Amino acid sequence: MRGWAARRAVTGAVRVLSLLILVGTTAACGGGAAGSPELPIPTFAEPSAAAAAGSGTPKGALPDDCGRLLSVVDLAALFARPIDSVTVRTVRGIPEPSVGRTGRVGCRYSAVAGPSTGDTLLDLNVGRYADAAAAAKQWQVNSAAERASEGNSRDVPIGSAPAVLVERRAETVLMVAYGVDTLTFVLPRPATGPRSAADTLVDLALRVLPQVAATAPDVTPTTAPTAGPMSAARTTALDRAAAERPHS
């Protein structure tokens, strides 16, 4: 009898404890629904704002990272290459006061996967000048030299930006003048991607020009040019403006 009574007492205590736990849990859930403060929902900064806050690039200076001009992901997609198959190397140039150049950045995009590993996919060079007149003057000198070299050349304005396209056996070059900046795109013949070299270069220019303009002084155009495919662009007389072809 004593053993049975002891077991009954323990069973009763367990039932009471279970009931108390159930009641406490129900009260806590009900209290939270009735008016307890809810956990805050996490918020995240906009990507553009976060990038601007952490860039550290002063207004008027060219970016010191080519990935801010054209990401390797964008280039891989444009060339129909797998993700993580492209790398980029950034080279900072020095000012050249004799021609009014205040800065320069060179970007070399290379393949790091597949049978073309190590091959150059694109060379991009950007020069920044004290004013648009200095950029135009230097561009005219260098574009004239490119026209005189072996290869076919034609004017391909990109929106309001004058540009010259030079096609050679080994490469295709696009030289653009845009405000205080000059841009040169060099596309090796084997790296043209699924489209023609001319169409690819115009597409690249339309992607890079807004990024360059975002870091330029206020004297440059605030709206990047837009244009249709290369086939839709008419050949026109080159404006008296100029850009340089800086080399890495």
Image (spheres, grey):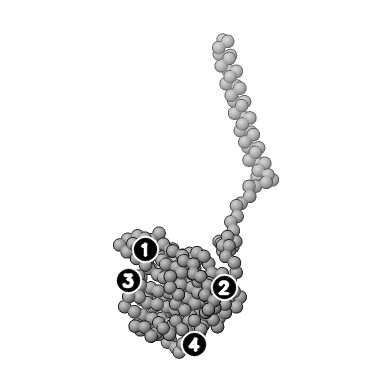
Which quadrant does the C terminus fall into? bottom left
Q: Looking at the image, which residue is at 33% across and 62% down?
A: 117
SS at mark 3 in the image:
helix
Is residue 46 at all visible to an observer of this figure? Answer: no
Residue drawn at the location 44% of the way across and 81% of the way down? 142
Quarter of the figure with the N terminus = top right
User: What amino acid is labelled 3 in the image?
Assistant: Pro
What residue does disc 4 label?
Answer: 239
Q: Amino acid at mark 2?
A: Ala
At x 60%, y 52%, the residue is 42
Find residue 50 and name its label: none
Q: Residue furthest front?
A: 98
Which residue is the site of mark 1?
Answer: 111
Q: Earlier in the sequence, mark 3 or mark 2?
A: 3
Q: Which residue is mark 2?
A: 216
Q: Secondary structure at mark 2?
A: loop
Residue 240 is situated, as x and y percent measured from the top left of the image, at: 50, 88
Helix, strand or loop status at disc 4:
loop
Q: Is residue 93 left or right of residue 152?
A: right
Relative to 20, is 1 above or below? above
Mark 3 / mark 1, whichever is N-terminal: 1
Question: In which quadrant of the rendered view does residue 119 lie?
Answer: bottom left
Distance, label 2 to label 1, CA atoms, is: 30 Å
Q: Describe the element under mark 1 as helix, strand or loop.
A: strand
Q: Earlier in the sequence, mark 4 or mark 2?
A: 2
In the image shown, does 197 or 171 lie closer to the viewer? 171
- The residue that appears at 63% across and 30% down in the rendered structure is 20
Q: Residues within 10 Å of mark 2 (few under 14, many from 20)?
A: many
Instruction: Return the x and y of residue 111 as percentages of the image width and height.
Output: 37, 63
